[in-house]
Image (tube, helix red, strand yellow):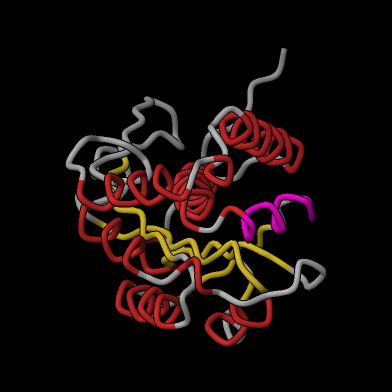
Amino acid sequence: MSSIRMDGFLPPIVISVIAFALGYQVNSILSNRPNPSLLTPTDSASSKSKNVKSSSSSSVSGRSIKSASGSDGGTDTESDEEDSQAALESELGATKFSSSEEMKLILVVNDELKMTKGKIAAQAGHATLACALTLKEANPRLFRAWQNQGQPKIALRCANTEELEILAAQARSLNLCARTIRDAGRTQVAPGSKTVVGIGPGPARLINTVTGKLKLL
């Protein structure tokens, strides 16, 4: 049986399998979470308040998200409290849209870190999950519109960390979900490096005003 080279270049079939498995896992996790739209107004408000104020560890409240692996794409990732708080304080529920318009999630990779394809795939997975869970809690109707369209995702690149931070701030100013992923620095990059920012899911017309000039990954 031939071995797969782990020199930073993965065959297209391997990348396709990783992408399929990741999408399946995210969809399974999301489908098993309770739907916030089924809560009473009082329960919904209470749930939102707990998510903003709680210091417990979860992907929505954002104390930390950690996953360790010894492979080339392995990573210990942390989504910090400040980023989570900023995402939840955006008026995600105020986004106006038509369910028939195009929806998408953008994953912007920090190009200055020169991560391998395996590393990028892992970081993009963290960003996808963080954005999806945050939006499902804050704006379930918008989340469902994106989900019903097949959960479209596009990977782009930005020049450096400064540009990554600017993009996140611009997205939040438009009441778009933006989640920035930090790496614990156990494989390829320095501790605290901002690897990927997820923008959306949301209306393509709004997201394009933030990321429309970026190049494909």
Q: In this view, does 26 lie to the left or right of 133?
A: right
Residue 101 in view in this figure: yes
Observer-nearest of 127 and 185: 127
Q: Which of 120 and 29 is in front in this view?
A: 29
Q: Residue at x 54, y 58 (%)?
A: 139
Q: Residue visible at 43% across and 54% down?
A: 115
Residue 91 drawn at (x, y percent): 42, 71
| Residue at the outermost top position | 1
Magenta stretch: give its range.
141-150
Q: Which residue is drawn at 45% across and 44% down?
A: 126
Quadrant where the N terminus sits is top right
The stretch drawn in magenta includes residue 186: no
Is 96 located above or below residue 100 in the figure?
A: below
Q: In which quarter of the image is residue 33?
A: top right
Look at the image and say whether residue 148 sits in the magenta stretch.
Answer: yes
The percent coordinates of residue 121 (x first, y second) are 54, 45
Residue drawn at x 35%, y 81% is: 166
Residue 13, position in %: x, y? 76, 37
Which quarter of the rendering shows the C terminus?
bottom right
Q: Is the magenta stretch mostly helix, strand or loop?
A: helix
Vertical position of residue 58 compared to residue 202: above or below: above
What is the tally of numbered marks visible in this picture? 0
Q: Where is residue 173 in the image (x, y as percent from the top left)?
A: 40, 82
Instruction: Name the image quarter holding residue 29.
Output: top right
* Quarter of image, res 142: bottom right
Q: Can residue 123 be seen in this view?
A: no
